[in-house]
Image (cartoon, rainbow, N blue to C red):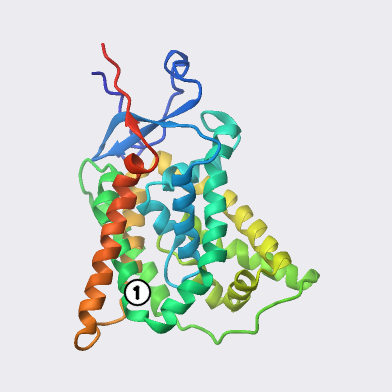
Amino acid sequence: MRRPATNRSADGSASPFPTRPIPRSRASRNPDSRLLPYHSGGAMMDTVQFEKKPFSVGNALKGLFIGMANIIPGVSGGTIAVITGIYDEMVDAFGNFFKSEGGWRRNLFFLTPVIIGVLLGNVALARLIGYLLETAPGPTNFGFIGLILGSTPYLVKRAGMRELKVRHALLFAAGLAVVLWMGLASRPEASPPITEVDLATGALVFGAAFVGSVAMIIPGVSGSFLLLLIGMYSTLQNAFSTLNIPIVILFVVGTLTGVVIVSKGIAALLRNYHGSTYAVVIGLVIGSAIALFPGFAAGAMILVDIGAFAVGAALSLFLGTGMKEKILGARVAESAQ
């Protein structure tokens, strides 16, 4: 069995992005599928082949989790994208929509269910998550901490570092410090939500969505928390819970604009400095778990917290590893020589 050549980025780590086009002879065997490199443990593993379908339930489900995370202050949609194994391809699809291998159609097929899932997560789960955070904040936060920390082994493999260097440790510490600083930052009092759109409020909503979109691309950075800091979180929560269509549309357009612009820079970093970029990512992710820690409950409630943590960690392991095989129906393509 022949293994494809490992692609190395400028910092010596294995990059998941192809450095050369897939040979036509291989691609022509199944024109309705897309061949993606699966990266693990510092080496490029066998090519994983996914059927290209007009709508991927697996990607929609991942988008649902990302959308759910986007509305929770302190939780990053980018972190959930990393946990579910969709991060690198999502960044590449947004940042190189018309340029990446397979063209814009492949990226459109990939992104459409993700975006639908994100919107459904924002709308359908806004009230549920708000209710859980109000009635059971401890177990809810411990569930998210388990979800985040359970992804750590997957992230370390995804980083593809052949050896741990001083710069990796420094970048990890920098990512950790940024999120901890954000977690300690004081939160301003909530401002009344914007419910009607004119030129001024429309520009404000669009700009806030642009800022919040950073969370979908940079793991560990909470878009909802950024909106809290600038006093726009109540507008976001009210718009999605009451289905205020004009404001929802402005949020969506502002978010997509920000995602496309930021993705270009992140895609370049992942391609050229993959290991170093993931060192920062791991710091951001672990920092977000620490920032969410609510303290231990008294008495028997601590068992509920531990149970919620275990459920979150198990879900993270499923999303990061098993989902590819169980939901997407991925199979390893072997070339018999």
Q: Residues within 10 Å of mark 1 (few under 14, many from 20)?
A: many
Q: Nearer the viewer, residue 259 or 8?
A: 259
In the picture, the quarter occupied by the C terminus is: top left
Element type where label 1 sits in the image: helix
Q: Residue 322: x percent and y percent? A: 30, 45
User: Does residue 37 appear anywhere in the picture?
Assistant: yes
Please name whichever residue, 276 or 18, is drawn nearer the observer in this view of the structure: 18
Please give the count of numbered marks on the rendered protein: 1
Residue linked to disc 1: 141
Quadrant placement of the N terminus: top left
Q: Position of residue 290 (x, y in %)?
A: 30, 72
Rendering coords of residue 261 (x, y %): 59, 50
Residue 12 visible in this rendered orientation of the protein:
no
Q: Which amino acid is tagged 1?
A: Asn
Above-or-below relation of 70 to 167: below
Quadrant housing residue 213: bottom right
Foreground residue, 274 or 256? 256
Q: Residue at x 65, y 84 (%)?
A: 192
Q: Is residue 87 left or right of residue 190?
A: left
Residue plotted at (42% across, 39% down):
271
Residue at the location (28% across, 31% down)?
45
Residue 221, percent across and down? Answer: 44, 64
User: Above or below — where is 109 with respect to 23?
Assistant: below
Q: Residue at x 38, y 69 (%)?
A: 179
In the rendered image, the residue lying farthest to the right is: 198
Asked if residue 328 lies left or right of residue 253, the reply is: left
